[in-house]
């Protein structure tokens, strides 16, 4: 019997994952904004990836809804909305899911599974992480633009759907404790505001040393407060996070030679934060740099670099179209750090 999957958040990641599950025979219902629902209703789905894979899913293979429809029939709920929308999204199904229904957060940030658990106490809320970037280019096209897998907090309930994900080409990497992975992914996602402020595709931005120096500043500050809080992020890159901070500062030619795979990104791929700014939407800066600022406040350590990045994104959210060169952004961040030291 087919399992029904309710995807709360039909954005790039939600549609890419749900589309592959639908192609593998699961009964998928997408809940999201009218703009994307209209696009995929008209064109169906064409799901491609960095390695040359391509999967097409006709519109009659999945369901669409602006609001959750018959959530009591869901065997699995995937939450892929922006972090700011987590509470509203799960409240829409509160009291309507069958007890014991697994609800998986596949979102940026650290605490979304806790929000879900509080609102849906009879469900089994699990943290998860999507470790790759997805680009939506319109006309039903969703492209995995970088390497990565799906990570999930381990629990016996995962056995209910793990085989279906594997059959869909989405094997789940199970972790007894997902928090080190979440913190490690947050470290990588600290590049999102830098990319958004650069106005450049990810590959171009990461190929330029001054932008990488900005990321090194941001990650180094984050690692200090994590260490003070006794948080040990997992290793998701070829080298440990502490060493990566130093290697981000090397000359461009050296970085390209040593970290060619880091730059193996679709030429047009941008961070989700860049997409949010382009569409005039609120970003997830509070769940990225904001997490570091809050952690710094908890342990009594200043975080001027992440605080300044947060301020710059808030200015951009207000409609300021300024784009920063790497040199200018680095000066902004080093200036913020120096002001605290003085």
Image (cartoon, helix red, strand yellow):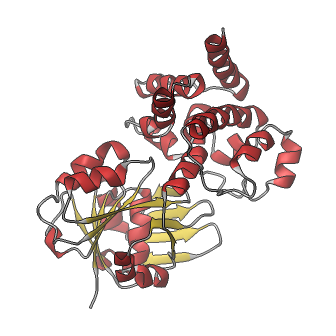
Q: Quadrant of the N terminus?
A: bottom left
Identity of the residue drawn at 55% across and 75% down? 54
Residue 261 lies left or right of residue 120; in this view the side is right
Identity of the residue drawn at 79% across and 54% down? 259
Residue 147 placement: quadrant: bottom right
Q: How many marks?
A: 0
Viewer can see residue 317:
yes
Residue 77 placement: quadrant: bottom left
Q: Which residue occupies the extreme bottom position in the image?
A: 1
Task: Give the x, y percent position of residue 37.
Answer: 30, 60
Task: Give the x, y percent position of residue 71.
Answer: 17, 68
Q: Quadrant of the C terminus?
A: top right
Task: Give the x, y percent position of residue 174.
Answer: 50, 71
Residue sitting nearer the eye, 103 or 64: 103
Q: Is residue 321 above or below residue 90?
A: above
Identity of the residue drawn at 50% across and 65% down? 151
Task: Give the x, y percent position of residue 302.
Answer: 56, 22
Q: Is residue 202 above or below residue 167?
A: above
Residue 234 placement: quadrant: bottom right
Identity of the residue drawn at 69% across and 48% down? 241
Q: Is residue 209 above or below residue 22?
A: above
Q: Which residue occupies the extreme top position in the image?
A: 342
């Amino acid at each position: 019997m087919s399992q029904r999957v309710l995807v709360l958040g039909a954005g790039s990641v939600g549609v890419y994952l749900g589309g592959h599950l639908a192609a593998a025979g699961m009964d998928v219902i997408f809940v999201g904004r009218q703009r994307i629902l209209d696009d995929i209703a008209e064109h169906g789905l064409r799901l491609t990836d960095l390695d040359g894979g391509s999967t097409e899913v006709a519109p009659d293979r999945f369901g669409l809804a602006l609001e959750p429809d018959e959530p009591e029939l869901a065997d699995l709920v995937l939450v892929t909305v922006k972090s700011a929308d987590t509470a509203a999204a799960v409240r829409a199904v509160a009291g309507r899911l069958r007890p014991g229904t697994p609800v998986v957060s596949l979102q940026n940030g650290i605490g979304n599974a806790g929000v879900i658990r509080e609102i849906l106490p009879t469900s089994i809320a699990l943290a998860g992480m999507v470790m790759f970037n997805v680009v939506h280019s319109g006309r039903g096209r969703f492209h995995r633009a970088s390497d990565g897998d799906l990570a999930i907090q381990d629990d016996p309930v995962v056995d209910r759907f793990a085989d279906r994900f594997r059959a869909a080409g989405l094997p789940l990497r199970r972790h007894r404790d997902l928090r080190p992975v979440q913190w490690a992914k947050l470290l990588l996602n600290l590049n999102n505001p830098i990319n958004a402020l650069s106005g450049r595709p990810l590959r171009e931005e990461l190929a330029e040393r001054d932008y990488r120096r900005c990321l090194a500043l941001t990650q180094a500050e984050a690692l200090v407060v994590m260490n003070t809080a006794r948080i040990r992020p997992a290793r998701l890159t070829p080298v440990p996070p502490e060493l990566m901070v130093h290697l981000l500062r090397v000359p461009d030619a050296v970085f390209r030679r040593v970290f060619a795979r880091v730059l193996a990104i679709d030429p047009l791929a941008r961070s989700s934060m860049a997409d949010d700014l382009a569409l005039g939407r609120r970003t997830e800066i509070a769940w990225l740099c904001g997490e570091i600022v809050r952690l710094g406040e908890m342990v009594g350590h200043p975080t001027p670099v992440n605080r300044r990045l947060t301020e710059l994104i808030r200015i951009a959210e207000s409609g300021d179209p300024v784009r920063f060169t790497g040199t200018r952004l680095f000066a902004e961040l080093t200036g913020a750090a120096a002001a605290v030291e003085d």
